[in-house]
Amino acid sequence: MREWIFDLDNTLYPPTSHLFDQIDHRITETIGRILGLPPDQAYVVQKDYYHRFGTSLRGLMAEHGVDPEVYLASVHDIDYSVLAPDPQLKAGLALLPGRRIVYTNGTTSHAEKVLERLGISDQFSAIFDIRDGDFWPKPHPVSYDTLIAREGIEPARAVFVEDSLKNLLPAAERGMRTVWLKNARTTSGADRHDPTVCTAVIDDLNAWLEAVGAACGNG
């Protein structure tokens, strides 16, 4: 393998940190403020747009012409101190041969703060964020095609690790090997795993990295 592509939120850090719960709450607040809705109605809109458009942001842009920069600044105004350095994760990533890339529906600044808190900034050569995909999020095909073109990725020699099953399908269709990291927040597709979509299904990222590193002769 030449490229190792990792989702960010709830993949490189565990859901038990509750970092993404902060983002989720901020999304609800932001939608409520922008659309003038109470929290319960804003939450309904948030989840509807997420399922229909890939992100709530894309739905707000499509349905209401919302400025993405205003939205992104608001939803990433969170407390990153809930994350701590993860030496085991850093050691596992270092075992992988080739390039390592973060692929996120968030922003580069958000990704940089997460990587810094985890102590793994030096393990990644690139971050592909929502702006790089012209605000087309995973799982929209345009996002994957732009990632592949910008980074010069050869899909047959790439591995994509994600906690969201629906985001793996476009990667698999383009010839990547795909790894589904199941976690406490995983719900969609949990009872209907499709082996044609996932090369592997794991529930412990660090253990998988160690096993892959050993298989590559680096363990």
Image (tube, rainbow, N blue to C red):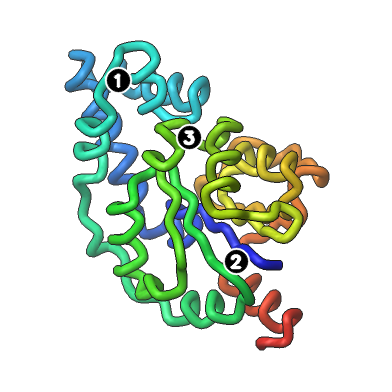
Q: Give residue 204's quadrant in the image.
A: bottom right
From the viewer's perspective, is the residue at label 3 or at label 2 nearer?
A: 3
The quadrant in which the C terminus is found is bottom right
Pointer 1 residue? 42
Q: Residue at x 46, y 27 (%)?
A: 50
Q: Residue at x 56, y 32 (%)?
A: 142
Q: Which residue occupies the foreground of this view, 149 or 96? A: 149
Pointer 3 residue? 137
Name the amino acid, label 2. Answer: Asp
Q: Position of residue 177 (x, y in %)?
A: 73, 55
Pointer 2 residue? 204
From the viewer's perspective, is the residue at label 1 or at label 3 nearer?
A: 3
In the image, 52: left or right of 192? left
Q: How many marks?
A: 3
Name the amino acid, label 3. Answer: Pro
* Distance between the alpha carbons at the discs numbered 3 and 2: 25 Å
In the image, 69: left or right of 157? left
* Above-or-below relation of 9 to 140: below
* Above-or-below relation of 9 to 217: above
